[in-house]
Image (cartoon, rainbow, N blue to C red):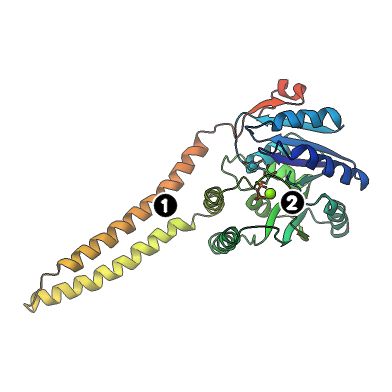
Amino acid sequence: MNLAIVIPVYNESDAIYNNFTMIYNSLDKAGIPCHYMLVDDGSTDQTWLEISRLKEQYPHVSAIRFARNFGKEMAICAGLDHIEGDRYLIMDSDLQHPPTCVRDMMRLMDKTGANIVDGIKQKRGKESRLYRSIAKRFYGLLKTATGLNMDNSSDFKLIDERVVDAIRQFRESNLFFRGVVDWVGFQRTAYYFDVEDRQEGETSFSTFNLMKLACNAILSHTSKPLYLTIVGGGIFLIFALILGVQTLVNYFMGNAISGFSTVIVLLLMIGSMIMLSLGIIGIYISRIYDEVKQRPRYIISESANEKEMKAGRLY
Ligand code: UDP
Ligand code: MG
């Protein structure tokens, strides 16, 4: 049973060498035959150099480098596109996904026959209170909007060949990996793990990035926000009808009063509703545009496996 491990790496030059060595030794000790795909997500520091060093030092390590930062989701997709195995594991490079859990995850897959072993965060490691509260709200919102239940879910997943084949068929450039794994179905089982604290460096996801990821997740899995605009319009129509009737009654009874403030408040409210609805529609249209352009999802600038580059498996 060959395990293919995909590790996205972005600006981790200080830590990647030691972290990978730890991962490698831990899995080696566990006696799991694996090979690795390190994906440098367009790092601006010395990460690629470190990865090349690792590649020379350890057998069964492949690596690709993006021409720029395409994001973790794309790095995972590229990794899965360029490696073959019987099973696939996705893990972070910062040791927050403990390699010591891998053997248990493999066993769980053997025992349950599941196609997906889903790493669920039990203890969430060191996070700011703001991060935690945003994460919590985000998952709540995601659940209401899309029905995807991803509370405490992570990218730490063991998936089998069939799931990877399904994921490889996705051609979306705005893809949310956890959402896609949920969407394809198959039999899944949860594996609870404690998130370790980040050893070195800092998270590369700022609050803004996380909000972007949240929008991405919602927009690529549901068009419900579009219906919200209809609901909002309906509510305003009801108000308009009531006010219209009242105005007419006043007019015929001869006591029509000049209500400037009402008019202004109504104008502002309706105006903002329209702007909001247009904004929501606009976001969806821009995403349709993104997909219609059919650009490559990522560009690989260097590969530690030149043969593959020449064979044209660039994206
Ligand atoms: N990462 C990536 N591209 C990015 C940001 C992050 O490939 O644009 C990688 C990063 O190197 C790490 C993993 O994704 O291996 C998780 O990132 P991080 O630890 O910054 O996020 P967090 O643990 O806070 O979710
Ligand atoms: Mg991390």
Estimate the x, y position of residue 79 in percent, counting from the top left. 72, 37
Estimate the x, y position of residue 186 in percent, counting from the top left. 73, 55
- Please tell me in which quadrant of the rendered image residue 55 appears: top right
Label 2 or label 1, whichever comes before in sequence order: 2
Residue 164, which numbered label? none
Quarter holding the N terminus is: top right
Q: Amino acid at mark 1?
A: Ile
From the viewer's perspective, is residue 1 above or below residue 61?
below
Q: Is residue 1 visible?
A: no
Q: Is mark 2 within 8 Å of ligand 2?
A: yes
Q: Is residue 131 visible?
A: yes
Dot 1: few (<14), some (14–19), or many (≥20) neighbours within 10 Å? Answer: some
Q: Which residue is mark 2?
A: 96
Q: Is mark 1 within 8 Å of ligand 1?
A: no
Q: Nearer the viewer, residue 50 or 250?
A: 50
Q: Nearer the viewer, residue 210 or 314?
A: 210
Q: Which residue is mark 1?
A: 280
